[in-house]
Each structure stands twice: as structure tokens, then as C-alpha cells.
Image (cartoon, rainbow, N blue to C red):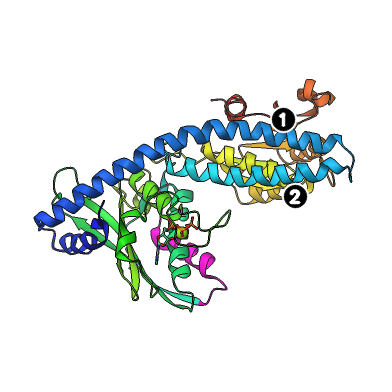
Amino acid sequence: MTDARLKGGGKMVLDIHSGRNEMTDEDRKKFEEELLNAKKLEAIGVLAGGIAHDFNNMLFVIMGNINMAQLKIEEGHPAQRHLIEAEKACLRAKDLTQKFITFSSGGSPVKRHVSMRDLVSSVASLVLSGSITSSEIKAPTDLWDVEVDENQMRQVFTSLLENAGEAMSRGGIISISAENVEISETGAEGIDPNEGRYVKVVISDEGMGIPEENMPNIFDPYFSTKYRGSRKGMGFGLTIAHSVIKKHNGHIMVESIPGNGTTVSVLIPASAQDGRALAAGRPNVPAPRKRILVMEDEEMQRDLIQTMLEHLGYEVNTALDGERAVELYSKAIEAGRDYDAVILDLTVKVGMDGREAVRKLLYLNSEVRAIASSGHSIDPIMHDYASYGFCDVLKKPYDLEDLREAMGRVLGR
Ligand SMILES: Nc1ncnc2c1ncn2[C@@H]1O[C@H](COP(=O)(O)OP(=O)(O)OP(=O)(O)O)[C@@H](O)[C@H]1O
Ligand SMILES: [Mg+2]
């Protein structure tokens, strides 16, 4: 293990600018160690991803059954308390498995053309809003486009900016810059970054920095020097960032001066052509992701269905009840971004249910592809869904495979 990514990172940046390969033996050794570290992280990712997928399927069943039990016992029953606790633990487990999936091979990127300038500035305004830190963003207007999985990349910059903010408990400035870099000569054999065009994003903070002895471990899962909570301080931020960047054939480097601050540099391969040229019509423009609207009143199930659909590569919007689903659907039509399918819960505690919602949606679009979703298999709609205007049904609890198959049937794939 080494701190190569840190000190070596600074040198690499210089090399990139000069376009020459000026690696010393020491640099080479450090980069080789980095490669080993990347292989170790990849192996952990494969293992964690496999476990996470199996675990997620079981979790849906556990959660679905907890929900079913909650529906079957009356409010105020002494067992409710235990079910609520079990439900909370499932939610934490779901969060954790999602993190594993993101850094494992299972979370393969669904790439689209994205402007890094827009992506980074929108993440920065979200992450830093209301915090005592302020940020400065410098990026040329002709910054190259990149082809990335937008959700994953947002997660990377969210983690990096959160880390920068968390390192400056008394406030300070986070500098963010982006530039085009061209590497004209490959580094030592097999060592990133390879030659090519990259967009480089650099995030610098004025925080407490990273002690030398922690450097070799910062990308490891569960390595954290922070107070550990169920969502924060898990030591997953940099693990996920590293894995996502690697999956995009990019490179991440960290430099730090303890007491002074930390600089994280990310290199992401630039698109072969920029977005404007692509908009003009290139044959291999990536197909836009199919858009799915999910109406589900239970927050836990809503989140889980969204997570699974996103994992399957869909873009997902959610609504709590029929009214909101109809509202979102009609706004989407107005914006010319119709949903490819909707999943409607048949039984909602309050408000418009799926049966009524599908009638309204059919009124807006007679070709709407709607799936009825219910835990009550005795509901007549579940057996005679077509006469109610649905294309398919999903019986809860369903797993990822059931969902994948249903979406395939409804979207004709
Ligand atoms: N900008 C930074 N300044 C100082 N230390 C940092 C910075 N970024 C990362 N670190 C160190 O690296 C460790 C690992 O970071 P990572 O983002 O993976 O986990 P975390 O922030 O502790 O937890 P999580 O991201 O899951 O909330 C941190 O605990 C911290 O010690
Ligand atoms: Mg973090």
C-alpha cells in the first residue's frame, strides 16, 4: 500500500500538461502499487456486488412481508412497534446494499452525453446550500462533453464535495475547476491514464487535510475517521467515487497537506464528439433511457421500486397517490417527455388509487402502458387487469427479476 495516488497525483498532473512521460522509478513504483490497489478494490467490489444483489432480493421480500403484516394487524397492536423497528432496519440495509451495488460490477454505467460544467455546478449548489462553506467554480465555456452515467457521476461529486465540506468544520472556500486536458503519451504500461482527451475536474478545500498514514486506506470501504452513522461516516464516499471513475475509464487522484487542505483531481474521458455535433445526428447516439412513473403511497416500497428500476437502467419519477401521478403525467406530456410506462399501486391509504388513476391516464393518452401493482392478489383487477385498462400486473412482494420481466413485456423488449 502506498500514498502514490497523492504525491504521484501531483506529478501526473504536471506530466499531463507537458504531454511528456517523465515518470521516475519512484513514481512508477507508486503507480504500480496503485494498480494493485485498484485490483484489490475491484475484487472486493465483485464480492460485495454479488452479495448485495442476492441480499436485495431477499430484502424486498422481507420488507414486503413486514408491510403485509402491518396491514393485517390493527393500529395500536403491540406487535406494530416491532414491525416498525424491523422496517427501519430494512431501510438501513437497503441503503447499504445500494452502496455495495454502486461500487460493484453490478452498477455498470448507463452512459449519456453530459456537460460536466452543468453537472458539477448543480451538485455543488445542492450539496453546499445552507452550509458555512462557499464554493468557486472555474470552467471554460468550451469544456468538452463527457459520456457518463449521470446518476453515478452526481454521486461521485456529491461525495467529494461532502468530504470537502466536512473537512472544514469552521467554514472556508471550496475551489472547483474544470479544464480540457490532452494526454499525448501513455504512461508506464498498463498504468492510467492512457493517452486521449479528458475533462479534468479539481476540487480543493482548506480543511484539516489527510494524515500521511491514512492515505493508503482512504479508498477502502469502511475506512472512515468520522463519527459513524447509518448514512454518514460509513467510509463509502471515496470507495464509490473510485469505482465509478474506474468504470468510466477515468482516474482519481488525491493530494493533501495535513493542516492545509486536500485536492482531489478527477479525469474523465471526453466524448469523441461534442454534444452539439451529436445533436446534429450521429448514428450511435445513445438511446435515451426509458422513463417510468411509479405511484406508490408507502415510502419504503416507493424507494425500493425506484431503486430497482434505476438499477435496471430506467429513469424514474415517483408519486404518492393517483392525483400526483396524473399531474406528473400531464406535465410530462406538455413537456414532450411522455413516460414509457407507469406502475400504479391499486390500494392507497389516502387519495386516488391505481384503478381510478389509470382511467384518468387513459383519458390523457389512450396508449398508456400501465402496470397494476398490488399486494392483494384477491383484488379482481389482478385477474382481469386488461378490462380495467392495464397492460400487466406485478404482485407484491416481487423481486428484481419479476420487475425486469414485467418491464420487458410492457415495453416490448
Ligand atoms: N477532503 C478531505 N479532507 C480531509 N479528509 C478527507 C477528505 N476526503 C476524504 N477524507 C478522509 O478519507 C476518509 C474516507 O472518506 P470517505 O468519503 O470514503 O468516507 P467518509 O466521508 O468517512 O464516510 P461517508 O462518505 O460514507 O459518509 C474520511 O473519513 C477522511 O478521513
Ligand atoms: Mg465521505
Q: Position of residue 166 (x, y in %)?
A: 48, 68
Q: Position of residue 319 (x, y in %)?
A: 71, 47
State the residue in front, 247 or 197: 247
Residue at the image point whose x is 77% and y is 30% from the top: 375
Q: Position of residue 160 (x, y in %)?
A: 42, 61
Residue at the image point whose x is 58% and y is 35% from the top: 56
Residue at the image point whose x is 21% and y is 50% from the top: 196
SS type, badge 2: helix
Residue at the image point whose x is 74% and y is 44% from the top: 298
Determine whether, in the image, residue 195 is placed left or right of residue 222.
left
Give residue 324's mark.
2
Callout 1 amino acid: Lys
Find the distance from the CA under tag 1 to the CA under tag 2: 22 Å
Give residue 396's mark.
1
| Residue 401, image quadrant | top right
Callout 2 amino acid: Arg
| Residue 183, image quadrant | bottom left
**Magenta highlight range:** 113-132
Which residue is at the far front? Answer: 213
